[in-house]
Image: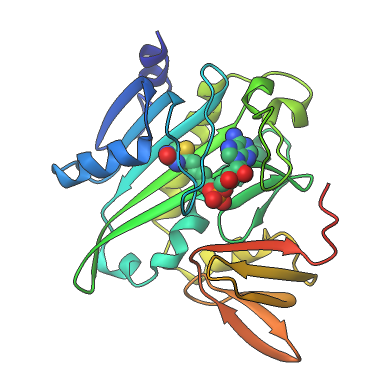
Amino acid sequence: MYEAAVRAALRNLPLGGLRVFERIGSTNDEARAWAAAGAADLSLVVADEQTAGRGRGDRTWFTLPGTALAFSLILHPDQGAGMAPGRYAGLGALAISDACALLGLKAAVKWPNDVLIGHKKVAGVLAESTWEGEVLTTTILGIGLNVLEGSVPSGVELAYPATSIQRELGRPIDRMVLLESIVSAALAWRDRLSQPNFLQVWEDRLAFRGQQVVVATDAGEQVAGKVLGLDANGSLRLEVNGKARAVPTGEIHLRPSNDRIG
Ligand code: BT5
């Protein structure tokens, strides 16, 4: 039933292949294994529920059945796009924010990989790349989105306040409509990944632009500064002590420095 609905929703999109699961560990893991076994460009893995969904590092991403979207798109970059691997998290975030805009919801991108509505996290993006030497061969673009009310994890401590599309919209919405909308926006942005306009739009949608933030790396370094924008690789440009400094994507957390996020 779930699979039939997914296939019907995506039938007009030029996907390389499609695998649909009622329940899976992580769609990114499935996509990575499929890519290693020769999956075509633009192949997609979709699951109703994840039992071992992943965020960055060793963090967990919760995907409860019947409520959310979890999927991973396999991208084999051409050399042009391969020059900008840091842009992939942005690609996912822009596609999600486009789909939100179609519903009349204004979403902001908390660099590098979260999508916020009203300062609360509604979606996360996990872009994982595979390299052969210097050449980027595959990027798995994983997207998790809280759609219905029940998707917002309860009883667990989250790194950031969370919300769902239903909560922000004030009414439930068909997950399949959103799935089609996000995947089709991702395909469109993928063709524009190397263009300056891609960065411009990503920058325009950045949360906390012009504000003081603290960026903390998993290595324990803390960088405080004002958000200026992005550089060509998708690194965050901060003004630190009057000087511009680029913070590359990686194991990084960003918070407004006054911590007023609710
Ligand atoms: C992310 O990591 O936000 C990336 C999440 C990517 C999930 C997708 S789902 C499809 C694909 N398959 C996977 O296995 N993963 C991808 P990060 O910025 O590290 O944030 C993780 C943190 O978000 C967790 O430590 C929790 O605090 C919080 N979190 C977990 N589940 C959440 C949810 N459903 N809604 C809001 N916050 C959540």
Q: Position of residue 256 (x, y in %)?
A: 77, 63
**Is residue 261 rendered to the left or right of residue 56?**
right
Q: Quadrant of ligand 1?
A: top right
Q: Does residue 172 lie above or below 156 as drawn?
A: above
Residue 183 seen: no
Quarter of the figure with the N terminus: top left
Q: How is the image coloured?
A: rainbow
Q: Position of residue 219 (x, y in %)?
A: 53, 70
Place residue 139 in its image quadrant: bottom left
Q: Position of residue 187 (x, y in %)?
A: 40, 46
Q: Which of 79 and 192 lies nearest the eye of the viewer?
A: 79
Q: Residue furthest left?
A: 37
Q: Does residue 133 lie above or below 11 as drawn?
A: below
**Is residue 15 rendered to the left or right of residue 231?**
left
Q: Does residue 113 lie above or below 175 as drawn?
A: below
Q: Residue at x 63, y 48 (%)?
A: 115
Q: Residue at x 44, y 58 (%)?
A: 88
Q: Position of residue 70 (x, y in %)?
A: 47, 32
Q: Does residue 33 lie above or below 79 as drawn?
A: above
Place residue 34 in its image quadrant: top left
Residue 42 seen: yes
Q: Residue furthest top?
A: 1
Q: Residue at x 64, y 29 (%)?
A: 153
